Amino acid sequence: MDASKKLVVIGGGAAGFFCAVNAARINPGLKVTLLEKSSKVLSKVKVSGGGRCNVTHAFFDIQELVKHYPRGQNFLKKSFHWFNTIHTIQWFEERGVKLKAEPDGRMFPETDDSQTIINCLLKEADKYRVEVRMNVDVKEILIHGSRFTILESKGNTLEADYVCIACGGGTKSSHFDWLKQLGHSIEEPVPSLFTFNIPNDGVTSLMGLSVEQATIKIQSTKLSETGPVLITHWGLSGPAVLKLSAWGARQLAENNYTFTATVDWLSEYNEHTLRQVWTGLRNQFAAQKMSSKNPFSLPSRLWL
């Protein structure tokens, strides 16, 4: 590639860094500059997975994998044929970072430390001479023929042959006006992957408790997820809740986030089978206090 060609990547998160380091590696003559609005890069990588960084998921069939994404399945299917879970694992292993799979399929670095992933990406950026510039807030992109002019909030400009937008989401479509001016269409953004706030509910007194296999449903909808559910001081969280909010992002927004959620803490039972088991337990432990028995291995405070 012509050494005079320049790529500017806007956004210093996981997507921006991954694009920048691979573009620089594959095209040795390409000058790559990464712009980050804040004073820190990869900040969300640092806190993801509770500070452990869940890098990918141990799911290797593309047809099945895309079914676990609430939106954009057709686009993702094409993308995964180019680069998927197997490629991700190989990419990190080739750079000395081994990933491990947990029983639920989530994959973390063996170190259980997100800094391992951050260090890997920073090392790649340094190795391939990616210029990283922080505190750069992009306000507008202008097109002049086949080139771009990037305008910063401080009045500085930057020329580029290629631009990659990896700046993440915005809370309303007006935040993307600078991209609409380039001819892009923007879907109205709504929150996704959020926890459930349950004001003035006694369940919050059990904050810190979690159940590995609970089923949470949104009443009057088909929305339902099974997996770990965590009780917090504001309501409910955990992977099952986050997945449920992702699948129901637009529907819950239309309802102004006012809804009724039901939690089945014993997802392996339905009402009929639980009644049968309960009858046997009453006979088996008839003379004992229920509080002293916990036949379902629920957290003791939740059982009480």
Image (cartoon, rainbow, N blue to C red):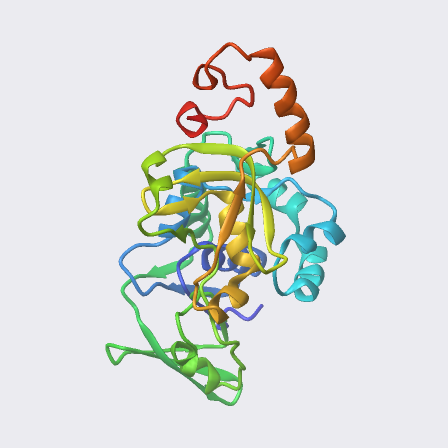
Q: Is residue 301 above or below residue 17?
A: above
Q: Residue at x 53, y 57 (%)?
A: 246
Relative to 9, is 297 above or below? above
Q: Position of residue 27 (x, y in %)?
A: 57, 61
Residue at (39% x, 59% y) in the render: 12
Residue placed most toward the observer, 196 or 143:
196
Left or right: 217 as drawn, with respect to 167: right
Quarter of the C terminus within the rendering: top left
Quadrant for the N terminus, please: bottom right
Direction top: furthest residue: 287
| Tally of numbered discs | 0
Figure quadrant of residue 267: top right
Q: Nearer the viewer, residue 7 or 185?
A: 185
Q: Is residue 1 above or below residue 277?
A: below
Q: Position of residue 280 (x, y in %)?
A: 65, 18
Residue 247 in picture, x, y percent from top left = 57, 58
Query: Which residue does the image show at 61% across and 24% down from the upper left?
Result: 278
Q: Residue furthest left?
A: 154
x, y percentage for residue 135?
27, 64
Q: Is residue 215 left or right of residue 189?
A: right
The answer to whether residue 208 is left or right of residue 88 is left
| Observer able to see residue 151 | yes
Toward the viewer: 293 or 36?
Answer: 293
Pick out the residue farthest to the bottom: 145
Res 232 visible: no
